[in-house]
Image (cartoon, helix red, strand yellow):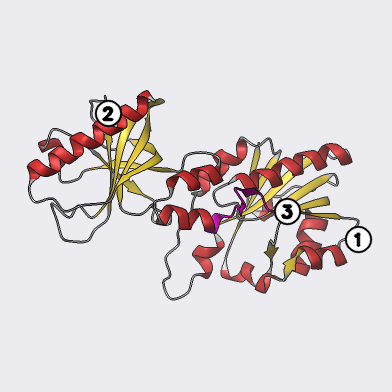
């Protein structure tokens, strides 16, 4: 897949089928749109399937009053996931306050039609773009024929009667509903970061953990202990993932992400690691002693090892 950074570097191709969106999470609904994008390319005999997305994410630029940004994927993760979908090109447009004031009509005519050469467009259900989000499928279907562009809107993907969306996946992760979040994503939700120094309490208890520094815009699931799978240096390990403020040891309220790799020994400081969230085990607890905490961790490890055997 070709990756083009910046609208100024975009290339015209008069045989292009295009989709547009943030694609945060690249979940099953997004994959359905991309599958249809590939199909339209074949049906219409076009040369290029093109996905237009934005960085920074519009939420980062348009958030009000310091509202937190909670994304399912970093731009690097989005690129990696979309590369698996067989799309020819991904155009990443820099999103700014100035760009946010662009009307859907100007963007559609000048960029999608004239600059990129789009002949067909595939949109997700209820998707809209441009200033005040006025560029929905209904509006596009009125103006597209004059530019010779076909517009198709894809129905939402449902699982167990629930339509899949990035917002619902975020809510599931905040509710520790890892099973549904992963089912809707179509893969295990993951956190990636650099291993940094912590307080070394786990090491003192005989359970050394890796403290991950996660990108500030990435959504971290609700506090608790999770069965997980850590991926480091091309190898995967069963792991216990602990998210929270470590109430037994501290009351400073700082959230940390700690990973205990089962069956691994070695120095991880300064290295990159990914951890996939597989199953919620228990809520965060304040134990009366370190011995009680140690027993709880040992039990977590035992449960995870038993799950690995299933």
Q: Residues within 10 Å of mark 3 (few under 14, many from 20)?
A: some
Q: Is residue 256 magenta?
A: no
Secondary structure at numbered mark 2: loop
Q: Which residue is mark 3?
A: 155
The residue that appears at 25% across and 37% down in the rendered structure is: 300
The residue that appears at 80% across and 66% down in the rendered structure is: 138
Image: 160 above or below 143: above
Which badge, 2 or 1, is on the more N-terminal residue? 1
Image: 238 above or below 133: above
Task: Give the spatial CA distance, label 1 vs label 3.
Answer: 21 Å
Residue 130 placement: quadrant = bottom right
* Residue at the outermost bottom position: 65
> Does residue 36 appear in the picture of this structure?
yes
User: Is 73 situated left or right of 129 in this image?
Assistant: left
The residue that appears at 57% across and 42% down in the rendered structure is: 79
Place of residue 273 in the rendered image (x, y in percent of width and height, measured from the top left)? 36, 36
Q: Which mark is residue 145?
A: 1
Instruction: For the residues labelled 1 and 3, say whether their Cβ atoms are less than 8 Å apart.
Output: no
């Amino acid at each position: 897949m070709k990756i083009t950074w910046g609208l100024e570097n975009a290339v015209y191709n008069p045989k292009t089928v295009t989709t547009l969106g943030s694609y945060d999470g690249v979940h099953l609904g997004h994959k359905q749109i991309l599958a249809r994008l590939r199909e339209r390319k074949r049906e219409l005999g076009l040369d290029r399937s093109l996905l237009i997305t934005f960085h920074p994410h519009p939420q980062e630029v348009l958030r009000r009053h310091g509202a937190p940004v909670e994304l399912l994927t970093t731009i690097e993760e989005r690129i990696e996931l979309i590369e698996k979908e067989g799309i020819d090109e991904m155009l990443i447009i820099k999103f700014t306050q100035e760009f946010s004031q662009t009307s859907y009509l100007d963007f559609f005519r000048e960029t999608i039609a004239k600059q990129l050469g789009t002949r067909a467009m595939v949109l997700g259900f209820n998707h809209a773009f441009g200033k005040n989000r006025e560029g929905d499928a209904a509006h596009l279907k009125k103006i597209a024929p004059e530019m010779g562009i076909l517009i198709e809107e894809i129905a939402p993907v449902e699982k167990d009667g629930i339509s899949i969306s990035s917002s619902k996946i975020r809510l599931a992760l905040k509710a520790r509903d890892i099973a549904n979040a992963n089912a809707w994503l179509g893969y295990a939700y993951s956190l990636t970061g650099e291993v940094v120094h912590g307080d070394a309490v786990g090491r003192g208890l005989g359970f050394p953990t890796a403290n991950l520094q996660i990108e500030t815009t990435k959504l971290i699931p609700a506090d608790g202990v999770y069965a997980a799978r850590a991926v480091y240096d091309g190898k995967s390990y069963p792991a216990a993932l602990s998210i929270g403020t470590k109430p037994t040891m501290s009351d400073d309220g700082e959230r940390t992400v700690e990973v205990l790799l089962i069956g691994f020994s070695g120095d991880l400081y300064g290295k990159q690691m990914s951890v996939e969230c597989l199953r919620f085990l228990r809520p965060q607890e304040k134990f009366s002693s370190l011995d009680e905490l140690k027993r709880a961790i040992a039990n977590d490890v035992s449960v995870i090892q038993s799950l690995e055997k299933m």
